Structure formats: structure tokens, C-alpha cells
Amino acid sequence: MTENPDEGEQLKREVGRLKREIEELKKKLEKEQEEKEAIKKEFEEYKVRHPENVGVKNGKLYVIVPKNISPERKKPGAKPGHKPFWRKMPVSVDKKVSIPVMKCPHCGNESLSEEPQIRKRTVEDIPVCKPIVTRYLLHRRFCSICNRYVEVPFTYALPKARLGIRLMLMVTWFKIGLRMTEEAIPKVLKTCYGIAISEGEVTQILDQVAREFGPFYNQLIESIRDAKARHMDETSWRIFGENAWLWAFITKGEALYVIARSRGHEVPLEVLGTHPKGVDIHDRYSAYKTLARKTGNRPQQDCWAHFLDDAEELAQNYGEEGQLILRVLKKTYDDAMKVQHTGSIEDVERLYHYMKGNLDRQYTSGNCRKFVKNLLDDKDNLFIFVTNPDVDATNNAAERALRHTVIARKISGGSKSIKGTKTYQTLVSVVKTLEKRGQDMLKDGSTILFASHG
């Protein structure tokens, strides 16, 4: 049987077409396999960065701590070897009460022993309080020199106020220091002290106290500017339900808070002015870098807690390269802290050269390479704390100072007005400054208030 030439050519073309399709399918399969491997690699990295015990809230990771219920209940109290703690006995006793026993409380027997044994119990309690209403009679006399009637300055209450300074400071402490709501404060005052005020009066009291502390708030600004070192940080806030920022400026003896619409460098620049003194300690946020340039390139201390946190993330995500960075930074930080702020320029150079000698290499990971480059380029801001006893290695002081305001924001939702914003930033600055100085709002608040007015 003779083969048809046309059919042979047709079969060859068909075989060629099938071979081309097979090659295309192979290439497509190889491409899909590569994409699959890439996705698998990304997923593995994602699992490392987002383990099952980690959640994400507002773009930030947090650890989901599992319940840790011990099968055996531990004995309450201090552990063996720990110093015990007990309530100290009061130094003085205000009154003594004798409680005789005339008959047995169990069986009713009245034939008890003649001489009783005395067992002592000392109990502390609070008295039943009621408000003290005082009517002041202010004498006025005519001054021939001033040509008017004069009287002694009245320091027992704020101008036009019908409530005493101590009571108004207590309301301030309840609201700002203890984060109580306007609804809760009147209930506490009525129940504990028998004083009736409304929720609206709470707001009025806060506004008036804030106005009177205005000069003290301005003094805090000057103290922050003249400080040898200051911590700075910011967190979100709300005004009228719109986004704003609450800034914290913290020194060893002052805490200044400023609420503004902006998160830019203009805010700390307005607070500190163009010629502040001392060292700025911060988390490397770009606004603080810009602030430094606009105020004479003053000394800056970057936060080492942030360096170590970033290095731990690199160690989790990028294997040996990230782990190397973390080891070197931990060793550098530990050596720097051993100096205890009494180091020399030679110590700084030694620390930097050790870090650079171990980190300055080629990295396959772009994130590791970028982190190391930014770190080594920022040499002047790494080790100021080594030689300066006024400078901390971390910005923890500012971050701790913001925790109170973050909780307050979650409770209140922020400020409802511009006036309320200024009231809050003034009062929280006063309350937190007194806490840092070891002072009490009720005992020392009035003294500071009148002293600030001259």
C-alpha cells in the first residue's frame, strides 16, 4: 500500500505542532512551579513573622499569651527566701475602745473568771466625712494712696468659685490622675464626702483649674527647653473625632504634654524654640531628625531599645544574617552599659569599631543591608549615653509617660473641643510633673498654683 505524500506532510505538521504545544506547556509548568516556590517561601516568611500566638491590631503585632493554668496550685505568699511583707503597725493610736465580756457568747454562762486577759487588735478606718462650709468675712478699708477700698488677697478659693481649692484639686486628680469619668466623680464625692456637684460642674472645675495652672504650664515649657536631656515621643489623639497627636516631652523633673493636629517637626520646634539646650532622646522618627537640623544640629541619642527590637525582627525573618546583627548589637549594648555613663571618647570609638567591624559586610537580604547602613551612618547619635550621665540609652521614659494618656484616650475617646484639648494637656502636664517630683496634688497643688502666679 503506497503512502499518500500529502498525508505524510500533514502528520509531520501535526507532530511539529504537538511538540511546540508540549514545549509551551513545559515552560508554563516550570513558570508555575517557580511561582509556587516563591509563594511558598513568602508564606514561610509570613509564618515566621506572624506566628500563631501573635495577633495584629492597628498595624502592630502583639503576643497572644495562652492560658497558663498550673495543675498544682501554688501556696500563696512570698516564695522561700524572699523577704516577707506585712502591714506596718500605726505609730500613734487616736482612741482606745474597751470591749468587756460579761457572759459566754457560746453557752450564755455568766460565771466567768474574775481577771480578764487582754487581747489587742489595731484597726485603721476612715471617718464619716461631711463638707465644711466656711463663711469668710473679708474686711475692706479705704486706702488714701490707692484712692480705693482694699482687702487682703483671698487664697482659700479660686476667683468666683464657691468650692474650695482642695476640693477642686481633688476633682482634677480624680479626672486626670485616676482617669475617672465625669459621671463617676459626682457619685464618689456624694458617697464619701457628702458633697453634691453635677457632671457639668466637673467640666467647669477642670477648665478653671487649667486656666489657673497656665503660668505653671508655661514654666514647664521653659524648663523643658533648658533641660540637660529630654525624652520625646508621640501617640495618636482625637479632637472632634478627628485624628490628632499627643506629644510628650519628659525630663527627670518635668512632664510636658502638647496636643496638636500635626505629627511633623513643627510641633516640637514650637515647643523647644530654635535654640534649646541639652540632648534629645527619641526613637529616630524623622520629625526629630528634622528638628535637630533646624535647631543647630544638637546632640541626639537614638533609642537602643528600638535598635534591639528591630534586630530581633531581623533575626526571626532573615536567618543567620539577622541573628548576626542581633548578637553584635546585644554585645555592643551590654558593653556600653557596663561603662555606666562614665566612658570616654576612646570607649565610644572602641564600641563603634567593634560594631562596624562585625556588621559591615555584604548581605543577601535588602532589609538587613538597609538596617546596617542606616545604623552605621548614624554614628554620632549612638553612644552619647556612654559619656553623658544625664542621657539614657533608651526612650523608655517617654513611652511610659504616654501609657497614661493612651488609656485615657481609650476611656474618653479624646477631646470634644479645642478648649477641652488645652485643658487636658495642661492638667495632665501638672499631674504627671508632680508625680515625677514625688509631690502630691492635694498637698502641693495649691502651693505650686499660687507660686506660679507670683
Image (tube, rainbow, N blue to C red):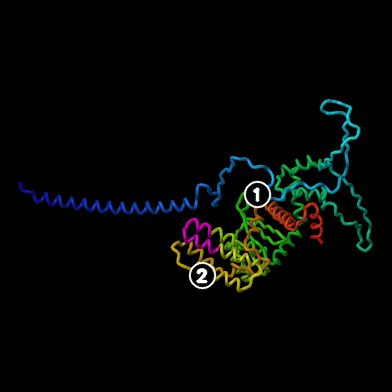
Decide whether residue 322 is among the magenta residues: yes
Q: Nearer the viewer, residue 170 or 416?
A: 170
Residue 27: image quadrant is: bottom left
Report the mark closest to the observer, 1 or 2. 2
Principal secondary structure, stretch drawn in magenta? helix
Residue 151: image quadrant is: bottom right
Q: Three-letter amino acid code at disc 1?
A: Ile
Give the image location of residue 439, x and y in percent: 77, 56
Q: Is residue 310 left or right of residue 423?
A: left
- Mark 1 highlights which residue? 407
> Which quadrant is the C terminus positioned in?
bottom right
Q: Is residue 315 left or right of residue 336?
A: left
The residue lying at 86 percent from left, 47 percent from top is: 92
N-terminal of the two: label 1 or label 2?
2
For label 2, the crowd category at 10 Å Cα-Cα, with few meaning under 14, some 14 to 19 and many 20 or more, is: few
Q: Is residue 264 above or below residue 84?
A: below
Q: Range of the magenta residues?
A: 311-329
Q: Secondary structure at mark 1?
A: helix
Name of the residue lying farthest toward the left? 1
Give the image location of residue 260, x and y in percent: 64, 57
Q: Which mark is residue 316?
A: none
- Mark 2 highlights which residue? 357
Q: Secondary structure at mark 2?
A: helix
Q: Nearer the viewer, residue 442 or 89?
A: 89
Decide whether residue 36 is among the magenta residues: no
